[in-house]
Amino acid sequence: MTNTRIPLILILMFLLVACGSGGGSGSGDSNGSAGSSQVEESLERLSDEDFNALTEEDKLGVSNKVMGALFKGVAPDEFFDLGVGVAALALQTDENYVAKIENDLSKAVNETRYRDLIKQKYEFDEKQEPIQYQLALLYEVPLSKNYFELWMAYQLTNTILFSPAVELDTVAYEDAQRIFERLVTMIRKSDTIREIVYAHMISQENWRRFRSPEDNTREMMEIFLKRFNDAEVPLAAQACKNWSLEEQDDEYRLIIGNEKNTEPVQILETTVVECTEFYRAVADHADLIPTVASKLVDIFFYGYLPEDKAAIVNDIVEDDPATFNDIFQNILFSKEFLLNVERPKQFEEVFFSLTDRLDWYANKSFFKNLNRVTGSSNFPSLNNMKQAAMIYKLGRQASVPLDTLSFAFYHKAVREKLLVDRKGNPDNDNDGGWQDSFINVSLVQDEFIDYLFLTVLSRNASEQELDELNAIIVDRGFNRDDRKMQQTIIVLDYLSRLSELYHTRPFEKEVQ
């Protein structure tokens, strides 16, 4: 047996990213896990009975599925009693952990403490800080009511609904911060979806994205109502004829002139005269809530057939959601999402969920580099992955870019910036990586490898995987119990190549 064994295995496992389960290009939205003619589960919450019907591994997997969607994670030592080993997993508690997660989202924390901590720990690009800061905030603030509000605002600013569109020359980086903070403020006031949409539509930030009465009004009807009626555009533009975007002092400003429209316009099944009345008609329209819900369903149920997504949207609308909290919680804690969804994960779902589980430490420039629009073409930034935050005019695509180059940067970030990056100097803020506390467990040999698998994939290693990895560890001379660090690097390097790391997976109830 020679050291050529590990490169061969790693190359083969890397190929699984392209050909493994769910590892397609992401170019289509009709070949996902729910390729049936109807959704299999309801949007009801996962009951205690449903949770208890899962295997012990799958209980951790389901918990990490919702936590991953929230960019957080559950480590095995939080979930299982590792003192009895991992051969027969023993839960720390019999409670429904998914219900616990939902309950944690109702508990407030001192957010100011974490904002102050960010100022001390991290450095940002002077110009691009408004699109980099939010990632540090999501990393530092623990799961809580505050966190859920920040997470919802971040999700929304990455959709076509509220994207700041920083890539446009009429948009300033500060616009991203203003949109994000306005969403957070209004969500925290329990403002309705309609109120939030209206406030956004009349804002200067929205007009910097869609710049003329014709363009802006057309996009508002298309984006928020799925209404594609060219005949209505001149009528809407007439109502908004005194609104314009003009360049002043090297920036673009929304100007509302005195020459208001005075002629009543029949549009959106109502009569409007002035521009604010048009925006109010959009916000109050019956199609607004179904359209907003459909944009979010497209993301979280990517790959479902159109008729299945329509059924899910109908279920959401039937609950008469008033706030974004209502829609997001209906999606995240539904049986359909938790048990059946199989789709590519956004970068944050993989990376930030793992940072929670591996006790990872971010170096002071990490978030500056992660969402830098310009900079090194070699750094695995969100921009290089084509998953940049708050950048695109039409927001992120529902499909995660999995073309060769985009995924190469995605994999590079997960592997090199996290899984095989150990923090060697605890006193150096420039040194990031997982910390030794992550592997400070009493487990050894096969059980230690299983622990690493549980941490990253929420499952134990297969017998074949144990045999292959142990052979590599022996080849390298790292089979002693005091060589856990080296064993960890080998195992995590392997795990970085598995397609299942980058996709959510369905779960089945345990057969009694």
Image (cartoon, grey):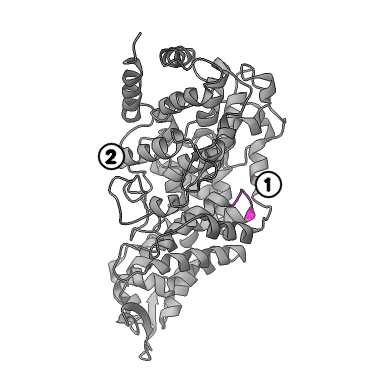
Between 237 and 432, the one nearer to me in the picture = 432
Q: Position of residue 289 (x, y in %)?
A: 50, 59
Q: Main secondary structure of the magenta part?
A: loop
Q: Residues within 10 Å of mark 1 (few under 14, many from 20)?
A: few
Res 408 → quadrant:
top left
* Residue 142 within the segment the image draws in magenta: yes
Q: Are the residues at dot 1 and dot 2 in contact (C-beta closer than 8 Å)?
A: no
In the displayed structure, 179 sits above or below 458; it is: below
Answer whether residue 162 is visible to the viewer in this image: no
Residue 67 is situated, as x and y percent measured from the top left of the image, at: 56, 41
- At label 2, the amino acid type is Asp
Q: Quadrant of residue 89?
A: top right
Residue type pointed to by label 1: Asn
Task: Reply yes or no: does residue 135 show up in magenta.
Answer: no
| Residue bearing the label numbered 1 | 103
Quadrant (top left/top right/bottom left/bottom right) for the N terminus:
top left
Quadrant housing the C terminus:
top right
Q: What residue is shown with label 2?
A: 403
- Dot 2 falls on a residue whose secondary structure is loop
Q: Measure the alpha-carbon separation of dots 1 and 2.
A: 38 Å
